[in-house]
Amino acid sequence: DAGITQSPRHKVTETGTPVTLRCHQTENHRYMYWYRQDPGHGLRLIHYSYGVKDTDKGEVSDGYSVSRSKTEDFLLTLESATSSQTSVYFCATGRRDSFSNTGELFFGEGSRLTVL
Amino acid sequence: QQQVKQSPQSLIVQKGGISIINCAYENTAFDYFPWYQQFPGKGPALLIAIRPDVSEKKEGRFTISFNKSAKQFSLHIMDSQPGDSATYFCAGKWSGGSNYKLTFGKGTLLTVNP
């Protein structure tokens, strides 16, 4: 295991409330990613980070923001949750050499978010 | 805009049979094509990957075939086993300077019947 911990693992919230998901890694990997997984859509990239304080948008970034103030933590924030953001969220990390040479990412076990 | 198209959406195979999952990509900037395997309740994990200058890569019962001119690649699982039942994702890796990211297909749910 790549030592990736996602929290919370399960959360139910109401429309309009802010939500923060945390990804913590112990592997000192440079790259970190947030994906969402939905039936019929597969894995879609929300935001990613290629270093501390260096982040960029993915394909479905609207309504989400991220922060990475230190190597080990990558936070995903839903400023005002909507029902369309009900999903399973996966954090992934990548080591520069293995990711660049093989495309290998290490995934956490996911955070299931339900927005009522 | 889907850059990696994957088919079929689901697949049922008998034990001992061959499972074949196909992917097509649009972005010629992809420089690596990994396949991921995901079991229920778990995150995906790298299964096997191929570079675009290689036509085939085999690891045990798993083989990737790659056709660069057609922009297509496929995963073959020989002698499929019930333990292979999982969701499989193909992906393309994009590299831009020091930035790397994966674009995934929509996934194939494989069921191997005993």
Image: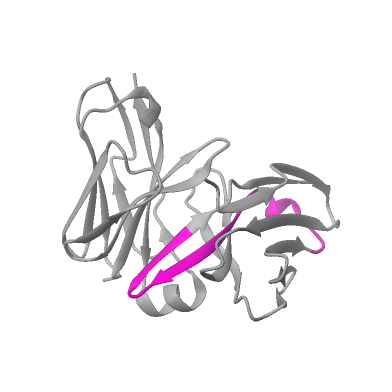
- Percent of width and height locating residue A73: 21, 57
| Residue B80 drawn in magenta | yes
Relative height, residue B20 to residue A51 (above, below)? above
Q: Residue at x 83, y 58 (%)?
A: B18
Q: Quadrant of residue B24?
A: bottom right
Mark count: 0
Which stretch appears magenta? B78-102
The colour scheme applied to this rendered structure is one colour
Question: Between residues A18 and B100, which one lies in front from this camera angle?
Answer: B100
Q: Residue at x 85, y 57 (%)?
A: B16
**Residue B64 visible from this viewpoint:** no
Relative height, residue A88 to residue A35 (above, below)? above
- Percent of width and height locating residue B39: 57, 49
- Percent of width and height locating residue B70: 73, 65
Q: Residue at x 42, y 71 (%)?
A: B95
**Residue A115 visible from this viewpoint:** yes
In the figure, is residue B30 to the left or right of B20?
A: left
Q: Quadrant of residue A105?
A: bottom left
In the figure, is residue B92 to the left or right of B62?
A: left
In the figure, is residue A100 to the left or right of B37?
A: left
Question: Between residues A100 and B82, which one lies in front from this camera angle?
Answer: A100
Relative height, residue B46 to residue A46 (above, below)? below
- Percent of width and height locating residue A103: 49, 69
Q: Main secondary structure of the magenta part?
A: strand
| Residue B97 drawn in magenta | yes
Extreme residue in the left direction: A69
